[in-house]
Amino acid sequence: MTVSKAITEWLKGYDMCVVRVDTDQVGEGTDSLGIFKSPTRERTDFLESSYQITEWYQLFVVREGQENRDREDNDEWLENFAYWVDNCQYTKELPKLDNHRTCEDIELAGTPYMFEAKENNTVLYQVTLKITYTREREVEDEW
């Protein structure tokens, strides 16, 4: 399973009201969500056979935005999403990774914000997630 897919599964823990999360695209309808992997990656090697990776993922969410009340509701929804992500660090409800990888942390990198107002009376919001995980190398004993 990719890290993107693991984050997608993890997002189901929040009241998303979306049917699915698309990878590398965002649907047109309201409550569509897309996840995009950023090109930035940090890596820290450890003395043993493991290393730590930090990556960033952009979430784009389409919401109703015609009325001021819609935008206020969206602001509240995004604020509560930020609190949920913050709480997951403490409750250890982190994305479940495979292939010898363990999620150490996931957090917001910045504040969720309105990215674009669309012609069909919807608004596109952007949220950046920062995920840090450890990967154990599969190293055979040389002795």
Image (tube, rainbow, N blue to C red):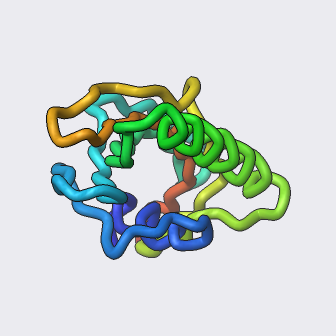
How far from the left and from the top, in percent, is residue 69?
54, 39
Q: Quadrant of residue 124?
A: top left
Q: Is residue 95 visible?
A: yes
Please indicate whether residue 95 sits to the left or right of residue 63 in the image. Answer: right
In the image, is residue 68 above or below residue 59? above
Q: Quadrant of residue 82?
A: top right
Query: Which residue is at 34% across, 26% downward?
Result: 115
Q: Position of residue 67 (x, y in %)?
A: 42, 37
Left or right of 107? Residue 137 is: left
Q: Where is residue 73 drawn, in percent x and y? A: 58, 44
Asked if residue 45 lies left or right of residue 80, the reply is: left
In the image, is residue 111 above or below residue 54?
above
Residue displayed at 35% across by 37% down: 66
- The x and y percentages for residue 114 are 41, 27
Residue 142 in view (yes/no): no
Q: Quadrant of the N terminus?
A: bottom left
